[in-house]
Amino acid sequence: MPVIYIGTMAKPATGKKKRAAKAAKTKTRLAKAKAGKAAKLKAPPQQAKADAKAMHGDIPRWTDAEIDEAFRRFAAREPHPKGELHHTNAFTLLVAVVLSAQATDAGVNKATPGLFAVADTPEKMAKLGEDRIRELIKTIGLYRTKAKNVAALATILSEQYHGEVPRSREELEALPGVGRKTANVVLNIAFGEPTMAVDTHIFRIGNRTGMAPGKTPREVEDELVARIPAKYMQHAHHWLILHGRYTCLARKPLCERCIIADLCKWPGKTVAA
């Protein structure tokens, strides 16, 4: 017997309509979850305002004496800081830093043991090939592009540099996947050059504290290199990275445990000057 619909009674949803309705609900739920996550990651309004003020250079800059005192404290607390990327030689360091772009050191360190166990020289890495490299690093973000770059730079080092990592900035930056920051890290850690590798942590600290304001990483780098006393430059970028990674956090800085809080000019800090 056919079903008769009376008045404004709605027809039962068809299978297609049910699936569409379910998909719409799922999309709405995911959108709300994404918005909630973004809200949690977003800095509190007062902090965001203070950061914006610092970014515009509207806070006092540090004096030379204050910069010297800050690094004296860093050096006293940790005389010989080290980078957190695992490596065994200049080549594995170079590869690890290339892989760390838009990824965490911890994430890279989980992937590289397997990679370096079979290829810890440019010759071995070039022989391994892009496909195999890609399989070994697929847990890292942008792994396809990174695998291509690592394979290419390994081939270049094997064929043009006799398997050695060059120690000039120009030659390093000419390699696939190597930018100024990566070159600075390799020059500093592998060859002991007093370079300043400005990552997101150092860029934030330079602007937030007033130590070295700049609109670009290069501006912050140049300011730090010009003002940090030479006796501290060898380890300066390590101290600043570690400070940004574990104390001067982006969303919720731990001002109460900061050893340079009294020198900091940030209007958003949560401890008295």
Image: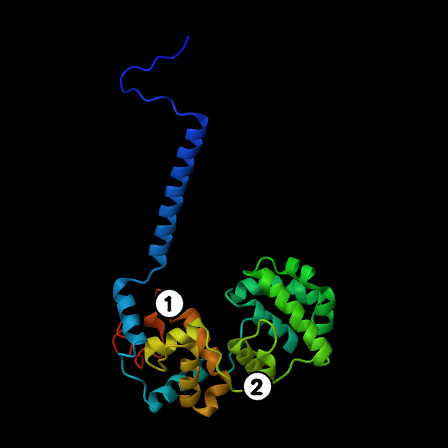
Work out whether residue 184 or residue 159 is closer to the camera in this orientation and state it. 159
Q: What element carries label 1?
A: loop
Label ID, residue 250: 1
Is the residue under label 2 in contact with that under label 1 (CB below 8 Å)?
no
Q: How many labels does the image show?
A: 2
**Residue 4 x, y percent position in the rendering:** 35, 12
Query: Looking at numbered disc 2 in the image, what kind of residue is underneath it?
Result: Gly
Quadrant into which the N terminus falls:
top left
Question: Quick check: 38 above or below 4?
Answer: below
Quadrant into which the C terminus falls:
bottom left
Dot 1 or dot 2: first in sequence order is 2
Separation of disc 1 and disc 2 at Cα?
A: 29 Å
- Quadrant of the rendered structure where residue 107 is? bottom right
**Residue 172 located left or right of residue 206:** right
The residue under the point 37% across, 53% down is: 37
Query: Looking at numbered disc 1 in the image, what kind of residue is underneath it?
Result: Ala
Tell me if residue 198 can be seen.
yes
Tell me if residue 269 can be seen.
no
Q: Residues within 10 Å of mark 1 (few under 14, many from 20)?
A: many
**Residue 138 located left or right of residue 39:** right
Q: Residue furthest top?
A: 1
Q: How crowded is mark 2: few (under 14 residues within 10 Å), some or many (20 or more)?
A: few
Question: Quick check: 123 above or below 195?
Answer: above
**Residue 179 x, y percent position in the rendering:** 54, 75
The residue under the point 40% across, 42% down is: 27
Question: According to the image, label 2 marks what residue?
Answer: 192
